[in-house]
Image (cartoon, rainbow, N blue to C red):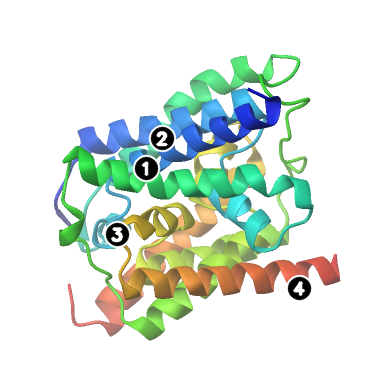
């Protein structure tokens, strides 16, 4: 198998594991997500455990992975270079949160939900694609 | 406050799989498993030779959803429905797309991967989207909505 085939296979495994995890965690249920966000009403704390589980596993192994010279199947690690806080991160985070709270879909569950898509899921995903394209188009021109 | 439908074990297990996926992608390919970033590079590509693995990863997300349904674990997807009308879904999708691109990440990229690398940027991003999502649900459900 060529190196690029191995890379694609690794991406497929990672994506599948991620999608299955989103299903098992019930992040694909917008009612559960919005109940998690409803601290002052019918609160479902479960999704804090999704974050805790994901963070615990990832935080435990990431330092060991990054001690390597290079990844298994690529030349180098491509990590976000910026660590500092700026206005952009705040504005973007707040806008994303409003959208997340309105419908209960963050990007991962939106895409995994295509596996049982109805017109509502197609609608929110199409709007996500349009919003993503528009934002990247504008950001490219002002950068 | 009333606590409802609490499922800590499946949530923890699902979360652990997500963390494992992110760690595996980093180990194998050296990339961050941020869904909005991976999707953004497909929707508006910056370089042509960087699209393939992204598409395959996104395909895996859907495949994982299928396997979850076949597994018979948890709640059947027939019980899952949108919690908002179409116009609100459109607004929500647009905001999630625009916000994650301006803020360079979403729940996975900042919340799982960034926090694991102790990035201050990701911590602020996570606090911002969690905070604004909680305020949004409060407004929708308790100030304007009649649903409790």
Q: Is residue A25 visible?
A: no
The residue that appears at 32% across and 58% down in the rendered structure is A37
Query: A21 above or below A106?
Result: above
Instruction: State the residue position of label 3.
Output: A116
Disc 4 from disc 2: Cα separation: 33 Å
Say which of B51 and B13 sits in front.
B51
Q: Given the current orientation, which residue lies at the most extreme front position?
A: A1
Q: Earlier in the sequence, mark 3 or mark 4?
A: 3
Disc 4 from disc 1: Cα separation: 33 Å
Disc 1 from disc 3: Cα separation: 12 Å
Question: Which percent across, then down, holds residue B112?
Answer: 50, 38
Q: Dot 1 falls on which chain? A: B
Left or right: B20 in relation to A91: left
Viewer-nearest of labels 4 and 1?
A: 1
10 Å crowding of disc 2: few (<14), some (14-19), many (20+): many
10 Å crowding of disc 1: few (<14), some (14-19), many (20+): many
Viewer-nearest of labels 3 and 2?
A: 3
Q: Quadrant of the N terminus of chain A?
A: top right
Viewer-nearest of labels 4 and 2?
A: 2
Disc 2 from disc 1: Cα separation: 6 Å
Both marks 3 and 2 on one chain = yes
Marks 2/1 in contact by CB < 8 Å: the verdict is: yes
Instruction: State the residue position of label 1.
Output: B64
Q: Quadrant of residue A16?
A: top left
Query: B127 above or below A20?
Result: below
Q: At numbered mark 4, what does the secondary structure look like: helix, strand or loop?
A: helix
Q: At numbered mark 1, what does the secondary structure look like: helix, strand or loop?
A: helix
Q: Earlier in the sequence, mark 4 or mark 2?
A: 2
Q: Dot 3 falls on which chain? A: A
10 Å crowding of disc 4: few (<14), some (14-19), many (20+): few
The residue that appears at 36% across and 68% down in the rendered structure is A121
């Amino acid at each position: 198998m060529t190196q690029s085939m191995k890379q694609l296979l690794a991406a497929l495994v990672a994506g599948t594991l991620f999608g299955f995890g989103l299903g098992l965690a019930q992040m694909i249920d917008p009612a559960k997500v919005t109940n998690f966000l409803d601290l002052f009403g019918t609160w479902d704390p479960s999704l804090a455990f999704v974050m805790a589980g994901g963070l615990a596993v990832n935080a435990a192994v990431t330092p060991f992975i990054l001690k390597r010279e290079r990844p298994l199947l690529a030349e180098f690690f491509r990590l976000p270079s910026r660590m500092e806080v700026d206005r952009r991160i705040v504005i973007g985070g707040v806008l994303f949160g409003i959208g997340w709270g309105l419908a209960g879909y963050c990007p991962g569950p939106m895409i995994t939900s295509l596996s049982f898509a109805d017109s509502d899921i197609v609608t929110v995903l199409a709007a996500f694609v349009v919003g993503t394209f528009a934002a990247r188009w504008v950001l490219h021109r002002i950068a | 406050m009333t606590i409802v439908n609490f499922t800590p074990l499946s949530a923890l297990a699902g979360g652990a799989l997500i963390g494992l996926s992110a760690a595996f992608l980093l180990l194998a390919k050296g990339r961050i498993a941020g869904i909005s970033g991976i999707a953004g590079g497909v929707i508006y590509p910056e370089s042509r030779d960087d699209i393939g693995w992204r598409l395959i990863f996104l395909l895996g997300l859907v495949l994982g959803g299928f396997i979850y349904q076949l597994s018979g674990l948890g709640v059947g997807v027939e019980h899952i429905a949108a919690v908002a009308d179409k116009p609100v879904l459109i607004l929500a999708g647009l905001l999630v797309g625009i916000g994650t691109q301006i803020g360079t990440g979403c729940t996975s990229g900042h919340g799982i991967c960034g926090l694991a690398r102790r990035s201050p940027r990701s911590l602020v991003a996570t606090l911002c989207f969690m905070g604004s999502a909680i305020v949004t649900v409060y407004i929708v459900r308790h100030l304007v909505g009649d649903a409790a």
